[in-house]
Amino acid sequence: MNIARAGLIAALVLLPVAASGGPDPRQDLIDGMAKCAAITDGAGRLACYDALNPTLQAAQAAPPPPAAAAPPAATADNRPWYDIFGVSPSRQTTPQTFGSEGLQAPPPPPGTPPAALPPPALDSIAAAVTDYAFNPYDKFVVFLDNGQVWKQLESDTGMKARFQKGGKNTVVISRGFIGSYNMTINDGPAYKVTRVK
């Protein structure tokens, strides 16, 4: 292959790059090199690379590309968005803390008061009845001194509840199966109830 032909191939390959005068000489250089690499003839490929020299110089003289978009903002407590479990490497600021996200927290120093434990869940409560009423189906509604209001379930098959007229009535409400509640009135039988207030 003669030099004239190799030069013609290089000129044809690089013509779109030179003509584009694109805003990014670096991209023009990359595109030109890709086209040169596709030439199978050794002399033509070399001529193509030689013809890229002005594009290379333009790319070297071009200002740096604009900075990439800023990363997403940190969360409200200044953790990065991806640190949902609080194990961000940014929290590991000393050699002693490096890689510590899988370790148990160290015990508190001696003399530190223990953290308050949450109170245990209640299994039952007791309260005094301030008022009560029956619906037409003999199912009761009770108003308690703690502000709560409970009613007997329509599906409860127990006999009609008995309250002391003019006397003090007390109830004990306890957890039943699968989220249900049972109420005893004055230590009597249990009724199925639900809280309405």
Image (cartoon, rainbow, N blue to C red):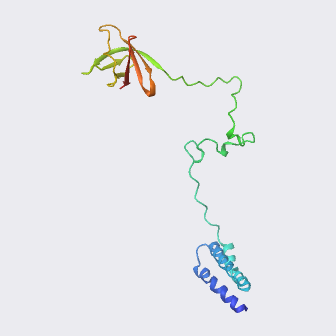
Above or below 133: residue 59: below
Tell which residue pokes out farthest to the top in this image: 167
Question: Relative to the observer, which residue lies in front, 102 or 94?
Answer: 102
Q: At 71% from the left edge and 24% from the top edge, which residue is drawn?
A: 110
Q: At 73% from the left edge and 86% from the top edge, which residue is drawn?
A: 43
Image position of 117 (left or right of 59):
left
Q: How many labels does the image show?
A: 0
Q: In which quarter of the image is the N terminus?
A: bottom right
Choose top left, top right, bottom left or bottom right for residue 148. top left
Choose top left, top right, bottom left or bottom right for residue 29. bottom right
Q: Position of residue 76 (x, y in %)?
A: 55, 43
Image position of 195 (left or right of 20):
left
Q: In which quarter of the image is the C terminus?
A: top left
Tell which residue pokes out farthest to the right in this image: 95
Q: Where is residue 30 in the image (x, y as percent from the top left)?
A: 65, 73
Q: Position of residue 65 (x, y in %)?
A: 62, 66
Question: Relative to the observer, which residue lies in front, 5 or 189?
Answer: 189
Q: Position of residue 2 (x, y in %)?
A: 73, 92
Q: Tell me, yes or no, if residue 118 can be seen here.
A: yes
Question: Relative to the observer, which residue lies in front, 52 or 12?
Answer: 12
Q: Tell me, yes or no, if residue 147 can be seen here.
A: no
Q: At 36% from the left edge and 22% from the top edge, which residue is drawn?
A: 150
Question: Relative to the observer, which residue lies in front, 70 or 126?
Answer: 126
Above or below 156: residue 57: below
Image position of 19 (left or right of 40):
left
Choose top left, top right, bottom left or bottom right for residue 170. top left
Tell which residue pokes out farthest to the front in this image: 157
Image position of 23 (left or right of 195):
right
